[in-house]
Image: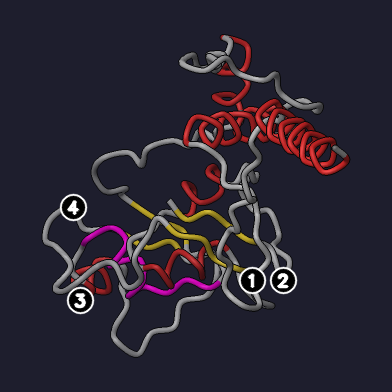
Amino acid sequence: MKKKWFVLIVLVLAASIILAACERPATKSPIATPTTEGEIPFPVATQPQILIDILKGTQTAAALTPQAGGGVGPTPTPGFSIATPEPTEEAVEVATATLVPYPTPTPGKPATYVIQAGEFPYCIARRFDVDPGALLTASGLDINSRPAIGFKLTIPQSGSFPGERALVSHPATYTVVAGDTIGKIACYFGDADPNTIYAANGLAAGTELTAGMVLQIP
């Protein structure tokens, strides 16, 4: 009799265990992510997320870019550009006003010319495109003559200079050294006009130069 009760109890316990196992949700073992030794695993962003991050970074950089007049610019809307304002008429007038006007040398050759500091007959012949020998003869000079400052040369109205008139290319800038005069600088360039150099630099005729000045040579 006792043996029957013992078998019955065992069957009841076995049935209870089986029922309990059926009611529990099945569990799965975690899937291990393979990693290379020495590397730290990190989350992989999806492609849409990468595009969002790039767009956000671009907008932030544009917003923090300094703008003319100080401050930072607004964040631009994707697909639109910020228009650059056109210069006003006032700005154009100011820029034009800063240009230094200078007269165009009068076509032709003067009848006479007074030698200035730093000039000599051969330089004057080159400047006015006349033959040096003809210039000396017309002025009562010879090849050994050394006319002083203030001497009046007679300029021939025919003939031309036998050679290259420009000694140094211009327009250019020239830095004045001690002892320079506008006439001497014009002779250095060859075919440059002293009056044009004065005008291009806003100087009155006869202005004394100081070492270190930078002149515009038209």
Q: Which mark is residue 211?
A: 2
Closer to the chain start, of discs 4 and 2, is 4
Mark 3 is surrounded, within 10 Å at the Cα level, by few (under 14), some (14 to 19) or many (20 or more) other residues, namely: some
Position of residue 30 measured from the top left corner of the image (x, y, whole percent) = 64, 50
The residue to which callout 4 is attached is: 157
The kind of residue tagged 3 is Gly
* SS type, badge 1: loop
Vertical relation: 80 (above or below) 12 = above
Closer to the chain start, of discs 1 and 4, is 1
Position of residue 9 measured from the top left corner of the image (x, y, whole percent) = 83, 35
The residue to which callout 1 is attached is: 39
The kind of residue tagged 2 is Ala
Q: Are marks 1 and 3 in contact (CB under 8 Å)?
A: no
The residue to which callout 3 is attached is: 133
Q: State the quadrant of the N terminus.
A: top right
> Going by the picture, which residue comes out furthest to the right?
2
> Going by the picture, which residue comes out furthest to the bottom?
144
Q: Nearer the viewer, mark 1 or mark 3?
A: 1
The residues bearing labels 3 and 4 have C-alpha atoms spaced at a distance of 13 Å
Which corner quadrant of the image does residue 59 belong to? top right
Q: What's the magenta region? A: 118-129
Mark 4 is surrounded, within 10 Å at the Cα level, by few (under 14), some (14 to 19) or many (20 or more) other residues, namely: some
Closer to the chain start, of discs 1 and 3, is 1
Vertical relation: 44 (above or below) 176 = above
Left or right: 197 with respect to 8? left
Q: Which mark is residue 137?
A: none
Which corner quadrant of the image does residue 38 belong to? bottom right
